[in-house]
Amino acid sequence: MELRVVEDAEAAAREARREILAAVNAARESSRSFVLGLAGGQTPRRLYELLAAEGGFDWSPVHFVWGDERCVPPGDPASNYRLAHESLLSRIDVDAACIHRMRGDAVDPDGAAREYEEVLAGLEDPDLVLLGLGTDGHTASLFPRSPALEESLRLVTATSAPAGAVSPRRLTLTFPGLARFRRGLFLVTGTDKRTILTTLREDPTAAERLPAARVRAREGELWIVDRAAAPQNLPHGGGPDR
Ligand code: 6PG
């Protein structure tokens, strides 16, 4: 868990943009496609706007997938697809065939989950998956105490969010699904995330209880957090793996 602490939410979005653009450029230079997993919630919006504002960037190697989706129509305000479409995908030159929407609006969420496994299976070596952090320690739509946490074979599953969460029914990558990505990139900002982030770093039982602590990408996870969300006792700039 590499933790990189930056001044504020804008700096965090800029640092995440830098990481993503550098990774896509590296893939392009080695003539590889690049599979980018998008996150939902509110935090990534500014990152997506900054990515879209990167004038003249060649997005042709990139296949866009999602880490999770709410079971709502794509135009619903709660849709993670809508967030990415309005803040990024509608603003860049990208082939529709490279946008792989999770069909949260399907009448059969389990069927849509299996369909998405086929989508992922058709994309070699997914590169980077963006992730957020809920104040309960969830990430993607992997919530504490959910049966989805025990899924060891399926890459994508239909699941439920806790009562009171936006959109109770979800589709989500599982830990095996997230583990197919080369790297995970958590983007966490705001004082409301400080308690859970401190718990993640300091509570030795966190890995058993908190889904975000259990994400393991092939080459590790980078956490970009702003000062407001960062644990108080960190050295300036963050810290290496625990
Ligand atoms: C979702 C996201 C979820 C999100 C966290 C943080 O579909 O809700 O995938 O995991 O990243 O809940 O959300 P915020 O960025 O809004 O704090």
Image: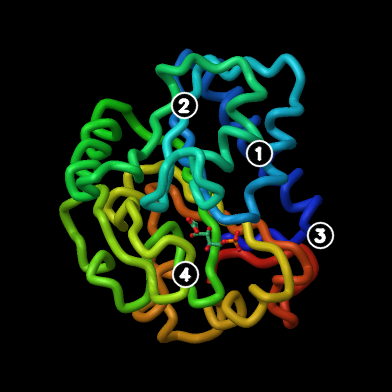
Q: CA distance from mark 3 to mark 1?
A: 16 Å
Q: CA distance from mark 2 to mark 3?
A: 28 Å
Q: Residue at x 24, y 42 (%)?
A: 112
Label 4: how many Cα within 10 Å (few below 14, some 14–19, many 20+): few
Q: Earlier in the sequence, mark 2 or mark 1?
A: 2
Q: Earlier in the sequence, mark 3 or mark 4?
A: 3
Q: Which residue is mark 2?
A: 34
Secondary element under disc 4, as helix, strand or loop, is: loop
Relative depth, front residue between 173 and 203: 173
Q: Which residue is mark 1?
A: 48
Q: Earlier in the sequence, mark 4 or mark 2?
A: 2
Secondary element under disc 2, as helix, strand or loop, is: strand
Label 3: how many Cα within 10 Å (few below 14, some 14–19, many 20+): some
Q: Residue at x 42, y 42 (%)?
A: 73
Type of the residue with mark 4: Ala
Q: Earlier in the sequence, mark 1 or mark 4?
A: 1
| Camera-nearest label, 3 or 4 | 4
The numbered dot on residue 165 is 4
The numbered dot on residue 8 is 3
- Give how far across and how far down residue 26 sits, in percent: 57, 24
- Give how far across and how far down residue 182 sits, in percent: 42, 42
| Ligand 1 closer than 8 Å to label 2 CB | no
Give yes or no for contact between labels 3 and 1 (Cβ–Cβ under 8 Å).
no
Left or right, residue 90 beside residue 170? right
| Ligand 1 closer than 8 Å to label 3 CB | no
Secondary element under disc 1, as helix, strand or loop, is: helix
Give yes or no for contact between labels 3 and 4 (Cβ–Cβ under 8 Å).
no
Relative depth, front residue between 170 and 94: 170
Label 2: how many Cα within 10 Å (few below 14, some 14–19, many 20+): many
Q: Earlier in the sequence, mark 2 or mark 3?
A: 3
